[in-house]
Amino acid sequence: MKITYNWLKEMVDINVSPEELAEKLTGAGMEVEDIVYQNKHLHHVVVGKIIKIEKHPEADRLVVCKVDIGQGQVTQIITAATNVFEGAVVPVSLEGADLVNGIKISKTKMRGVESFGMFCSGEELGIDENYFEGAGVNGILILPNDLKSGTPVEDALMLNDVVFDVNITPNRADCMSVIGIAREVCALLGKDLKKLNLSYDIDVYSKDVIRNFVNVEINTPNCFRYMAGAITNLNIQRSPLWMRARLNAVGIKPINNMVDITNYVLIEIGQPLHAFDKDNIGGGQINVRQAKEGEKILALDHSEYDLNEDIMVIADDSRPMVIAGVIGGMDSCITDKTTTCVLESAVFDLKSVRITSRNIGVRTDSSARYEKGVNVANAEMGIARALHLVCKLKCGKVVRGVIDICNKKNDVRDIVCSVKLINDILGIEVPTTEMVRILNSLGIETKALGDKLNCKVPPYREDIENDYDLAEEIIRLYGYNHYDSIEYKLFDKASVTEGQNHPRLSLEREFRKSLIEQGFYENISYSLVPGDINKKLMLDEDENKLVKIANPLSEDISCMRTSLAHSLLENINYNISVGNKELRIFECGRTYKAKTIPLNELPIEKNVLAIAVCENGFDFFNMKGVVEKLLAFTSVQYSLERSKKSFLHPGVSADVVVDGQVVCSFGKIHPVVAKNYDNPENIIYAEIDTEYLAELPVKVRNVKAISKFPIVERDLAVIVNEDVTVEQMLSSIKSSCGKLYFSVALFDIYRSQSLGDDKKSLAFKIKLSDMEKTLTDEEVNAVMKKVLKALTFKHGAVLR
Amino acid sequence: MLIEELDKLKIETLKEIEYVQYDSRKDLAEIKVKIFGKNGALTVLSKGMKDVDPQERPRVGALINDVRKSIEEKFSDKENEFKARELNEKLENEKVDITEPSKGQKKGAIHPISDVIDKMIDICVKMGFSVVEGPEVESDYYNFEAMNIPKNHPSRDMQDTFFINENILLRSQTSAVQAREMEMRKPPFKIICPGKTYRNDSDSTHSPIFHQLEGLVIDENVSMADLKSMLTILMKRLFGEDTSIRFRPSFFPFTEPSIEVDVSCPTCHGKGCGLCKGTGMLELLGAGIVNPKVLEMAGIDSKKYRGFAFGFGLDRTAMILNSIGNIKYLYKNDIRFLEQMK
C-alpha cells in the first residue's frame, strides 16, 4: 500500500527523515518495501517565462528563446516546439537535470547557436492531463501565468512528496490507511495523533433533510453498517492541485472533485465510499441485499456481470446499482451533469466481499480494503471527513442529517492479561512500566495492577484478543534486538525428549549412500506431471487413478504422478538432449493415486525408490546386482517372479515377491514406453517399496558353525534346455547334496551352435563339507553321482 | 712361500671383487669359480697344505680360513650391494604416472536438497526432535483451517494454492502437519517435518514445487528465547560457528507473536555481498509462538501448554549452502549440475 510522507506529517509531528521513519516502521512489522522521492527526476527543472522568441538563423524548424528563469537571470534555449509563445510560462530543465525519460540536460550548440536547457512537456515531467491541465498536449506544458519564474517545478506542480510502499500484513487491516500508519508512527516516535478535521457545514437555508432524498433498508446479514448523506447543488469540476497531488502520489488517477474526495478518504481513513447520482436511484430507495439469480449489472469498468445469490448488491427499488464493496454500476454513477448526489459509507462482511470479488473476478481499491476488514467505526469517520472535504472544496451543499443503520456492536474491549505470562512467552523480562508505556502509545489504554494489565482495546484493533496478541504488540515495539545478546538457554525449563529419525528416511539414507558409491546421481523431480502419464507408461487407468489439479499453472504440471518411472525417463531424455551420457540416476519420491474419481478423500501417497540406468553394457543382471545389494540392508526374504509391470519388457524384468506382495520390480524398459519418451531402448529401471522395507523387523543374522575339516570342491558342467532356469538347477543340486551341502554357485554359462539352438551349458562349483570328519573321495563321488542323477531326471541334464 | 701366495691371493681377489662393476655383475660368479672352484686358486693353494711343515700347519690352516672368510664376506657384500641396486632399479622401472585417472566405478552424488534435509535431521534429532511426515495432497482443514486460516479469510491471499477440489489441495506449507501431529501426540514433544510443498507460482525465484522443513515444539514452558537459542544452534551447525541470527516482526495466522528470522550471510559474514544484496543478512525462515487458537483446535490445553514453530525454505537453504544461482537447477536433474555435488 502506498502512502506519503507529507500526508503522514499532516497527522503526526514527524521529526525524523523519511529513511529513518521507514526503518522504524519496518522494525515494528510495517515493512517499507520502497521509498520513492517524487522529485527524483525534477532537480534543476524550474518555472521560466519566455520573454522573446526569434528564428534560428540556420534552421527553419528551430526558434531561439530568451527565458526569464528568476532572480534576474535570463537564459537562452532553442526549441523545435510550436506551441510556445512570448509570455508563456513553461517548465525549463537546466544543466544537470536528469529527466524521467532518461534525457540528461547539458549546455549544447545547435547549428552554431548555444542552448542552455530544454522546455519540458508533461510527459517529460512524468505527469498526464488528469493530473495537470495541458500536461497531455503534444508539445510544451504551458503553466499558469501566475507562477513565479525560478520556482522549482516540483514545488509549482506539487511533486515534492516522498512515497512509501508499505507491506501491510493481513492481520493489520486497520493500517490500510494513512491514519492507520500514522497511529503506528505515533507509537514509534512517542507523539500524539493530530485530530483530523471532521466538521462540515450543513445547508441551513434549505428545509430538506436526508430522508427527503433517500431511504435505506438492509436486507442481508452481510452488511454491518450503512450510512448515507446527500449533497445538493453539485459543482463537478477538477479538484484542487493539492488533492490531485496526493492521489497521484499514491497511484490513483484524479477524475473530478467528488470522485477524488471518495478516493482521498479511502486512502486517508481506509473507508471506501460510493457516490450515487440521486436522480438515478429508483424510488429514492436504497436496498442492501443479495443479488437474485439472473440479475445483471453494467459496471464502471464497462463490463456486464451476471449476478447470483452469493453476490451482495446495493439496489434501488428495482435493480442492482452497485456490486457491494467491489464496483459501482454505470447507471447510477455521478457524471458531469449530476446535481444531487447520495454518498454511501458502508461496512460489509469481509468474507462476503471476498467471495463476490472472486466470483466476478474483479479487485478494486475498495474491495481490497473490505476483504481485509473495515471497522464499523470507520464508516462514521469516513462520511464526516468526506462531507468536510465537500465543504472545503466547495463542490456542493450538505443536506441536513445522515442515515445510519448499524447492525454490529463495536465497543472498546477490556482485556486483562498477565505480566508474568507475557514475559514467559517472550522468555525475556520486559519491565512492566515499558509494557504499559508501549500499549498506551498504541492507543490501548493500559493500567498495571500487580501482575495484571488492564487493557482497553480500541475498536479498530480487532486483531487483539488475548495475552499472546498483547505480547506481540509489546515485543515488536520494545524491539526484537533485545534477543540479539541473550545467552543460550535451550529448553532450560522444558522437558527432555528423545529424538528419532523417521524409519523410512533412515533406510533411504542407507540406500542413497550405497547407490552414490555405485555411481548414481540423486534426482528430485516435479511430482506434478502431464495428464497423459498413464498412457505413456501403459499403466492401467483404473489402478492408477489420477489426482488432477483444478487450477494448474499449465498442462505439463496438471496431475500428480502415478509412477516415478515417468520422472526418471523424462530426466534421461533431458540429459541425453543436452549431451550427457552414461546415466545412472535414482529418486526417492512419492506416487499419488486417487481412491475414487472424483476425489472424496485423500489419495494414496506411496514412497518409492526408483532407479534408472542408461549406459552401454549395463543390463538386467547389473541391475539385479544393484537391487540385491540394497535389499541386503534389510531382513527381507524374497523370491523372484516374472514381472507384470506394464512399462517393463515382459521377458527381461522381475518382481521381488514377499508373501505374494511385490516389493520391488526391475528390468528393461518396455521398448514402446522407451519410444513414448523418445529415449533409447537400453534403459534398465528398478523401483523399490521403501515403505514396506522400512517396516520390516531389524535384520538378525544366524551364523552357522564352520567345519574344522577341509571343504571339498567339485565342478560340474551339464547341458540343459534353455527353459530350465538356473534357480531350478541350484535348488536341485542343493537338495541332492543333503547334509554335506556347503554351497553351490554357477560360474559359467555357455551357448553355441554345436550345443543346439535351445540348449545351454551350465557349470557349477559345488562345495561339500562335513562337521565330523574329512570327506573321502568315495563319499564325494557318491554325492556327485546323486546330483547328476537328479539333474538328469528332473531337468533332462546331460553331462558335458 | 704358501703364506705369501695366500696373502697375495687375498689382496688381489678382494681388489678384483671390488672392481666388479654393476653392469658386469655376472663376473662375480666367474671369480667365485676361479677362487673356490674345483681348480680354483684357493682350492689349489689349500691342497699345498700337505707340503707344509706340520708345525706350521695350524698357522697356515688358520690363514687359509681367514682368506676364505674374507673373500666370502667380500662376495656377500658385493652381491648384497648389487641386489639392493637391482631392487631399486626394478622399483624405478615399475613407476606409474600417478596422474592417470583412477579406475573403478566413479562416485555419484546426493541431491542438494536431500543433503540439506539430512544435515538438518541430524542436527535436530540430537536436540530431541523426531522426524515425521504428512500427506502432500492435504485437506483444506489441516492446511488452512486448523492453522487459524478460515475459509475466505484475507490470510489465504498470502499463498497461491493448487486445489484438487473445494476441500482437497496440495499443501502450501509443511505447517499442515502441525495439527495432525498435535492431534496424534501427547505433549511434550518436538518434531520436524521435511517435505515437498506446492504453490501456484512460477518465476525466476519461485518454483511451483519446493521444499520446506517445519519444526514444532509443544511443552509446558517454552518461549521465544528458546526459539532463538534453538535456531541459533541449528544455524551455527548448518552454516558455521560464526553464524548469527536476528528476529524481525512478521505475521503468520498460526503463530503469535510471529517473526521472520534473518541469518548472517555465510558468504560475506555480515559484511554485505551479492548473495545478501549488501544487507549482510539472509531471510531464511518464519517462526513464532504457536497461536493458542491452533492448540485449542487440535485439542491441546493452551492454558497448560505452549509451543513454538518454525518453517524453513529448504530450496533457498540448499542454494545458499552450495552457491546455486538459479532455483530451476534444483529440479532439472542435469548431471552437469549434480556432478558438482560430489
Image (cartoon, grey):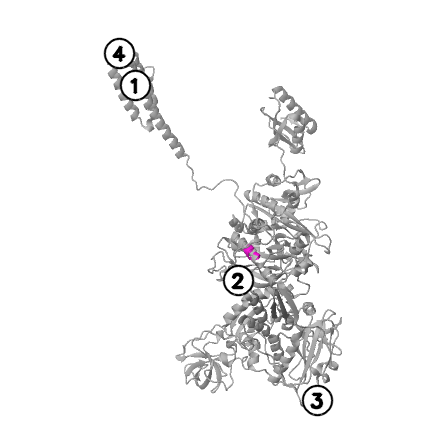
Q: Chain of mark 1?
A: B
Say which element carries label 2. helix
Q: Quadrant of the N terminus of chain A?
A: bottom right
**Nearer mark to the viewer, of 1 and 2:** 2
Q: Which disc, if any, is residue A482?
A: 2
Q: Give the Cα distance between marks 4 and 2.
A: 110 Å
Q: Give the Cα distance between marks 3 and 2.
A: 63 Å
Residue pointed to by mark 4:
B56
> Is residue A649 at least partly visible in the picture?
no
Residue pointed to by mark 3:
A207
First along the sequence among labels 3 and 2: 3
| Part of the protein shown in magenta | B226-231
- The answer to whether the residue labelled 3 contacts the one labelled 2, judged by CB atoms less than 8 Å apart, is no
Q: Give the Cα distance between marks 3 and 1.
A: 155 Å
Q: In this image, B280 relative to A766: left or right?
A: left
Residue pointed to by mark 1:
B67
The relative height of residue A252 versus residue A429 in the rendered view (above or below) is: below
